Amino acid sequence: MANADLPSEKLNSTEVKQANNAYRTYVLIILTIVYAFNFIDRQIIGILSPFIKADLGLDDAQLGWLKGFAFALLYTVVGIPIAWLADRYNRVNIIGVSLTLWSGFTALSGFASNFWQLAILRVGVGIGEAGGSPPSHSILSDLYDKTERAKALAVYSLGIPFGIMAAYFAAAFFLDGGSVDWRTVMIAVGVPGVILALLLKLTVKEPTRATVSHGPKQMGFVVSVKRLLKIPTWWGMCLGISFGSFGNYAISTWIIDFYFRVHSDMPIQQLLIVFGIVNGTAYAAGVWLGGVIADKWGRTTKRAYALLPTYAMLIGVPCFFVSLHVGDVWLSLGLMTILLFSSGMYLGPCFAIAQTLAPVNARAMSTALFFFVLNIIALGGGPTIVGLLSEYLTSSLGEAEALRMSLSCLLLPYILSIITFYWASTKIEHDWVEAERMQALD
């Protein structure tokens, strides 16, 4: 595989550019696949939730802990020191080791025999996944400049819908006819990640980092955090995606349980295939278009990076709420699809802003801090709180209505997301100019 830094004396400028473009496209693709495995292993427990509940005799509160807090417990904390390492050492090695860890723990989850064993293994999956996105974002930001960054990070973010799609399809395939159980699915989706880690190590080289013209090559931890926390737009986009993802993470981990209970006449395998298709098409299209539209619209006004998520969520959130309360399962699925399409649009713009407004020598730290806030609020909170609330309401409403009511309460964080994104749109132009000025001084 060609290196990103090809010797210009052996090739003319056109050939160098073509080779560099081909290589960076390859890196983008393989990092996107790694991110897809991240979400396969993250999502699979939510997809298999009804089967795990029945096999291990768990209640909704325990499922909520497994889907949310157990995974997020160390995932959110470990990401910070890993990002510190990624801003200084070989990022490809960090991603490879992390991928091996989270895939291995996912496979081992198939051998868990009780709640506590599964909880400990989910903590292990979280520790591994903490080393995925911060160094990946940093690598891509060195390969793509700010005019292409939202689109590149939107492509990378396609790992989310494609990973979720693959998890649904894998579950549908292995559970066909009840010939295997949830444990086999866990093992089957975990083992391939270890093989992918080897491919990554053999074919991707550590790219040359963007350099600073003045000051230290690497920004200290405290200094970098202080710089990031003083940027209003950084906070606005971070909280906007956090509140939105609070809802999305809760939905992604509880939606199969919801349809399994409320629309029990729909075969489970058909439901898994439908959600696989929806995530691989509508959600993926929203993620891709979010980056493309933001970069194109952003040439006219930088507010586009925050206004696009605002408008998209204004369309999707009402559809989600109605989808929970209609009687027809196909109408419900159609409305849920609109939410997935619209909510996918905020990923590329948010991740691009986290990189563009960050100091060059603190990009991995920016992503890690971004994900720290995002995952404390969303990944740790969304699935867990819905599970606890559902368990609390079950005695009075029954399992089906308790879960419907719990998911309906997600309307509140979605509204907060819309408000926060719009607030960020009023700050972004000033912060963009200030970031360029500070980067010129660094």
Image (cartoon, grey):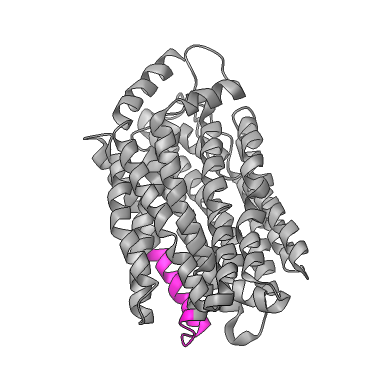
Judge whether 359 appears above or below 253 on screen. above
Image coords of residue 262 (percent x, y): 47, 80
Magenta segment, which residues? 262-281
Question: Which residue appears at 59% of the width and 76% of the height?
Answer: 395
Decide if residue 197 is on the left or right side of residue 270: right
Image coords of residue 278 (percent x, y): 40, 68
Decide if residue 204 is on the left or right side of residue 426: right
Judge whether 30 appears above or below 108 on screen. above
Q: Is residue 351 visible?
A: no
Q: Quadrant of residue 187?
A: bottom right
Q: Is residue 87 visible?
A: yes
Residue 278 magenta-highlighted = yes
**320, 138: nearer the viewer:** 320
Judge whether 386 appears above or below 198 on screen. below
Judge whether 67 appears above or below 94 on screen. below
**274, 409: nearer the viewer:** 409
Image coords of residue 288 (percent x, y): 36, 52
Question: In the picture, which quadrant includes the N terminus?
Answer: top right
Image coords of residue 400 (percent x, y): 51, 78
Question: Which residue appears at 42% of the width and 33% of the height?
Answer: 234
Question: Which residue appears at 56% of the width and 59% of the height?
Answer: 385
